[in-house]
């Protein structure tokens, strides 16, 4: 019937528009989460703290510093090379890409950061590209009274777009701090392994 064909013709453009909008929104979300589509608008900026996270390690701070710095300044293990790729290196500053698995490894967030080294006191990170426009971080290495090291992580995460960006920042910060906590556990495990050796 002629009426049915005309009705189908009217539905099709709307369906295509909705499907296209959903595809663009989905691609935008994946791009934002993965860091492939960085957004830095410079309006409605908000910041929030990251950390502090503190771990005490039964090893001197030079050794703990080396454990953290080696993937950037030395020979990284195969497992670390899958997570960290040094893009450019100087004597006390490197540019590195970090891969963090998301959603059970089906997606990876890739951030690019400068990493600065002040031996043996601190290692600093500054975001160049990622899911938010601003992150600065520091790993601080202090001697404890028992001859070990107190490793303290602190940072700041910033977003644009007022309350909307603040909500996005809360989601990113939660995942970011989980990744840092996993790194601190790995540092502690490696320090204990070396001490037992």
Image (cartoon, helix red, strand yellow):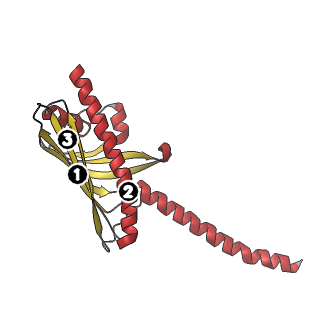
Real-space Cα separation, disc 2 to disc 1, in angstroms: 15 Å
Callout 3: SS:
strand
In depth, the one of 157 and 55 nearer the eye is 55
Please give the residue where the numbered disc 2 appears in the rendered image.
172
Real-space Cα separation, disc 1 to disc 3, in angstroms: 10 Å
**Where does the N terminus fall, quadrant-wise?**
bottom right
| Residue 181 placement (x, y as % from top left) | 32, 43
| Residue 161 seen in this snapshot | no
| Residue 2 placement (x, y as % from top left) | 87, 79
Q: Which marked residue is nearer to the observer: mark 2 or mark 3? A: 3
What is the residue that sits farthest to the top in this orientation? 197
Real-space Cα separation, disc 2 to disc 3, in angstroms: 23 Å
| Residue 133 placement (x, y as % from top left) | 31, 63
Left-right relation of 15 to 4: left
Please give the residue where the numbered disc 1 appears in the rendered image.
154
Callout 2: SS:
helix
Reading the chain from its start, which is encountered first: label 2 or label 3?
Answer: 3
Image quadrant where residue 63 sits:
top left
What is the residue that sits farthest to the right in this orientation? 1
Figure check: 165 above or below 62: below
Please give the residue where the numbered disc 3 appears in the rendered image.
151
| Residue 127 seen in this snapshot | yes
| Residue 165 placement (x, y as % from top left) | 37, 67
């Amino acid at each position: 019937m002629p009426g049915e064909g005309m009705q189908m013709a009217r539905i099709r453009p709307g369906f295509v528009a909705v499907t296209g909008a959903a595809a663009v929104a989905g691609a935008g979300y994946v791009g934002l989460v993965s860091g492939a589509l960085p957004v830095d608008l410079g309006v409605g900026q908000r910041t929030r703290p990251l950390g502090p996270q503190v771990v005490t390690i039964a090893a001197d701070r030079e050794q703990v510093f080396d454990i953290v710095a080696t993937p950037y300044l030395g020979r990284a293990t195969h497992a670390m090379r899958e997570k960290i790729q040094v893009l450019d290196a100087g004597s006390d500053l490197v540019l590195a890409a970090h891969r963090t698995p998301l959603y059970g490894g089906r997606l990876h967030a890739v951030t690019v950061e400068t990493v600065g080294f002040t031996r043996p006191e601190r290692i600093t990170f500054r975001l160049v590209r990622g899911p938010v426009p601003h992150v600065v971080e520091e790993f601080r290495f202090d001697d404890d009274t028992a001859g070990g090291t107190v490793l303290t992580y602190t940072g700041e995460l910033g977003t644009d777009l007022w309350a909307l960006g603040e909500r996005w920042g809360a989601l990113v910060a939660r995942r970011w701090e989980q990744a840092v906590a996993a790194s601190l556990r790995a540092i502690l495990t490696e320090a204990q392994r070396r001490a037992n050796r």
